[in-house]
Each structure stands twice: as structure tokens, then as C-alpha cells.
Amino acid sequence: MHSCLGQRTSCAKRVNAVHVNENARTNVLRRTNSLRSRAVQTKASTNTDVKMLVQGLHLEITPAIDEYVRSKIGRACSHVDSRDIREVDVRCSARGGEGSKGGVEHKTEVTVLMTRGPTLHADGVGENLYATIDQCADIVTRSIRKHKEKHGGKGARHAAHDASPKEALLDAEDVDGDDVPPAA
């Protein structure tokens, strides 16, 4: 039995409110998905496929800027297998200008979302947009190198620990020539 049979108006209002909330949530998801779908698979110079999203805030992303970002950040991410990188989000912004004191300040933020491991983040601030992109590419390269040095060799270390000394003795050749293993 429905709990609000006698109260048709309040039940209808609740249903409408739920419907409105679902519509708002759907619109937010559509906007997010449209940004994600605009992110194009980019091929770096080493033929790695990385999903890269380039956005501009108070700044128009021209094809030249887009190509420069994709080449620099793509090259920085090429030190890792492309399957280990889920997405790269690059946000370029400009602040200041003619109506304010001082010149234009450019800021570039790069977020590398890894499938396993940490999320790498890099910021670059300066007067030249291309210089800030270079700063971020250097920071991402160093972060990836640091992550690989810290976690890259663990597989070999675990493989070396898997074979216990007791198993090594049992696997060793029998010096006597008889088939009886030594007492452990």
C-alpha cells in the first residue's frame, strides 16, 4: 500500500522534486561528458595514445597552443606506458592585462590521472604561456621518473624473495650422487 494515498498532492510534489533533481543531475553529467568527448586522443612523438583534455580560462586555446601542449605534455607522458595513464587534464589561464596594474600573468595546471598509483599535478606561472607549459612538462617528467624509480623495481624484488633459502637447497644438485635429499 502506498504511504501517501490520501495525500495525493504532497506525493505528487515529491515525485516532481525527484524528477527535477534527476534532470539537473543528468544535465551536469551531459556537460561533463561533452567536455570529455571533446578530448581527442593525441599521438605523441613516440606513438603513445594519451587522452588529453586542453581547456582555457580567460584565454582562447588556438590550434598552435593546442598542438604545443599536446606535443610537450605528450612527450613528458611518453616515459610511462600509455595504458597506465587514464587521462591528462591541462588548464591554461590568463590573469591581468590592460585594465590592471602589471602585465598579463599566465598559469598552466596539468593533472595526470594514473590508472594505478598517484595523481600527478604540476603548476607553472609566468608572463609567457609557452614557458609555463614547458615548466609543467618538466615537472611531469620529473614526477613520472620519481614514481618509476620508487615503484618500478618492486616486481624484481618480489620475485627474488619468492624463492626461499630452503627451496634453493632442495633445488641444488645432490653432491653425493644419490637421490636422497639432505635432511632439513
Image (cartoon, rainbow, N blue to C red):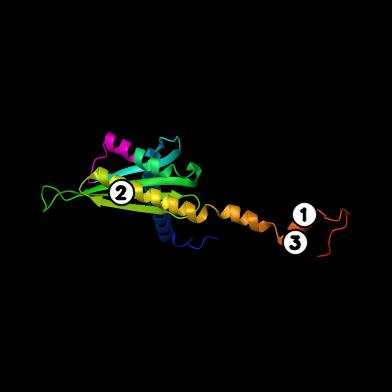
In the shown orientation, is residue 6 left or right of residue 99? right
Dot 2 falls on a residue whose secondary structure is helix
Magenta includes 148?
no
Q: Which is more N-terminal, label 1 or label 3?
A: 3
Tag 1 residue: 171
Name which residue lies at 27% across and 39% down: 61
**Residue annotated with mark 3:** 166
Q: Which residue is mark 2?
A: 135
Residue density around tag 1, few if under 14, some if 14–19, many if 20 or more, within 10 Å: few
Residues under labels 2 and 1: Cα distance?
54 Å
Q: Dot 2: few (<14), some (14–19), or many (≥20) neighbours within 10 Å?
A: some
Judged left or right of residue 97, residue 35 is: right
The answer to whether the residue labelled 3 contacts the one labelled 2, judged by CB atoms less than 8 Å apart, is no
Quarter holding the N terminus? bottom right
- Does residue 30 appear in this view? yes
Whole-percent x and y of residue 141? Answer: 39, 48
